[in-house]
Every structure is written in C-alpha cells, then in structure tokens.
C-alpha cells in the first residue's frame, strides 16, 4: 500500500498520525524543503513506515519502479491524465472520469479491477473553486456556481467513496484483514474559510463531516 505526502500539507505531525491510523506500509514524500522532509521522514520511520523522500515530482516518477504501485488515474482531463499515465509507465492506466457521474465512476472502478485484479485504495482529490462573496457589489452569490462547487467537491467525493467502498467490500481481505483504504481530501478552509470561499469551504466542511 502506498501513501503520498505533498508540499501542500504543512502539518507533519497530524499527517503522520493519519497515515499511522491507516497503517500505510509505504509513504512517498515530495517536498523541496529539506528541513520539512527531515521532520516528516523521522516521524514516519518512528512509526515503522517505509519512506521514499524526493525533492521533486520528476525525481519521484524516475524512482517509482522501486515502489511498484499500480495506479488508475481517473480524471476528466483526458490529455493530462493520459500523459501522466504514460509517464508513470506500465503500472499506470488512465480512465476518463467525471466524479459527479455514477456510470463514469463505475467505469473507473471497473478499470482498476480489470487491469490490476482488485481495488486496494482510492484517493479523492477532484475539486474546483470559485471566488464569490456571499453578497458583493453586483448582488448575491450566484446559486448556480455554489451548486456546482458542492456537486464536484462534495457530492463527487461521496460518489467515488461509495462506489469504491462497495468494490472493496466485495473483495477478499488481505493478509492484514483490510479490504482497502479510502483517502478524502479536505482543506483548512473547512475550518477557516476566507473571503469569497463560501462554496469551497462548505464543500470541504462536508467532506470533513463525512470522513472518519
């Protein structure tokens, strides 16, 4: 099993506890700040994790063969998704996916199973945002844009979560008793939204609320 720490999350103690709770066996760290990497590596190794630190994403990709994850990149952007899958090599596949569409997500889950035999993990990180005040100089926040952010960020996350969980529940447990792991991506905006973030903060607050 593989976990990823990116430079966008600056709370190493909390992050390490999250991965410990999920009992991740392997952790990839991509960060260009040596001091931050050293702190996270030390904490993760104290918890018994196998850690792979890199100072850039290209370096991580170059060394990915040593970790050997099998990945399905499910994204609405086919051009970038296919390019990334090609860059990652034989262990990666691309599946065109709209997280708000049930059949689209079912197809992505099926792609993972057909290519790699089972679905061991799902990382929810699809998201959009708009910058609109609740009441601005041109009037109230547009309801359509608020609905769109909620649909993609919150409903889309739940759509992937429920369908991935259903597939995992149907699988035989692994040696450690687990059938799979799901990671939902929220934001500090869930707790401390800024001006113009009403829709985004609401969507991320919903993700926090439905995640263990």
Image (tube, rainbow, N blue to C red):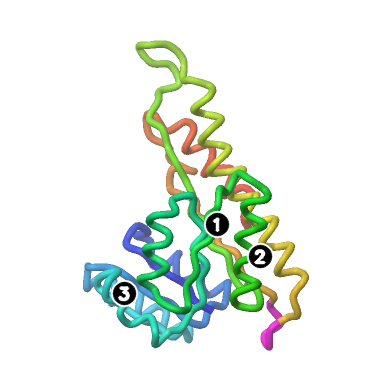
Which of the pair 133/172 is nearer the observer? 172
Q: Residue 130: x percent and y percent?
A: 41, 32
- Position of residue 209 relative to residue 26, above or below, is above
Main SS of the magenta part reads loop
Task: Report the quarter where the N terminus lies.
Answer: bottom right
Answer with mark 1 or mark 3, whichever residue precedes in sequence.
3
Q: Residue 175: x percent and y percent?
A: 68, 88
Residue underneath mark 2: 110
Q: Residue at x 47, y 37 (%)?
A: 200
- Position of residue 19 relative to residue 101, above or below, is below
Q: Secondary structure at mark 2?
A: helix
Residue span colored magenta: 174-178
Separation (CA) of disc 3 from disc 2 = 38 Å
Q: Residue at x 43, y 16 (%)?
A: 135
Separation (CA) of disc 1 from disc 3 = 24 Å
Residue underneath mark 1: 184
Q: Residue at x 42, y 62 (%)?
A: 82
Q: Which mark is residue 39?
A: 3
Which of the pair 117/189 is nearer the observer? 117
């Amino acid at each position: 099993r593989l976990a990823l720490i990116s430079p966008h999350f600056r709370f190493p103690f909390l992050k390490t506890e999250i991965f410990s709770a999920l009992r991740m066996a392997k952790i990839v760290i991509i960060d260009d700040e040596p001091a931050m990497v050293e702190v996270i590596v030390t904490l993760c190794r104290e918890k018994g994790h196998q850690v792979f630190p890199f100072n850039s994403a290209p370096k991580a990709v170059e060394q990915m063969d040593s970790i050997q994850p099998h990945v399905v990149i499910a994204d609405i952007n086919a051009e970038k998704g296919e390019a990334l899958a090609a860059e990652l090599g034989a262990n990666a596949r691309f599946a065109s996916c709209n997280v708000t569409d049930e059949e689209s997500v079912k197809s992505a889950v099926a792609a993972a199973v057909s290519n790699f035999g089972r679905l061991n993990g799902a990382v929810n990180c699809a998201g959009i945002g708009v910058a609109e005040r609740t009441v601005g100089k041109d009037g109230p926040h547009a309801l359509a844009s608020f609905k769109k952010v909620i649909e993609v960020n919150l409903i889309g996350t739940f759509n992937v979560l429920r369908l991935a969980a259903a597939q995992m529940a149907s699988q035989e447990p692994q040696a450690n008793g687990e059938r799979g792991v799901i990671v939902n991506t929220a934001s500090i905006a869930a707790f401390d939204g800024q001006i113009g973030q009403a829709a985004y903060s609401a969507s991320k607050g919903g993700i926090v609320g439905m995640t263990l």
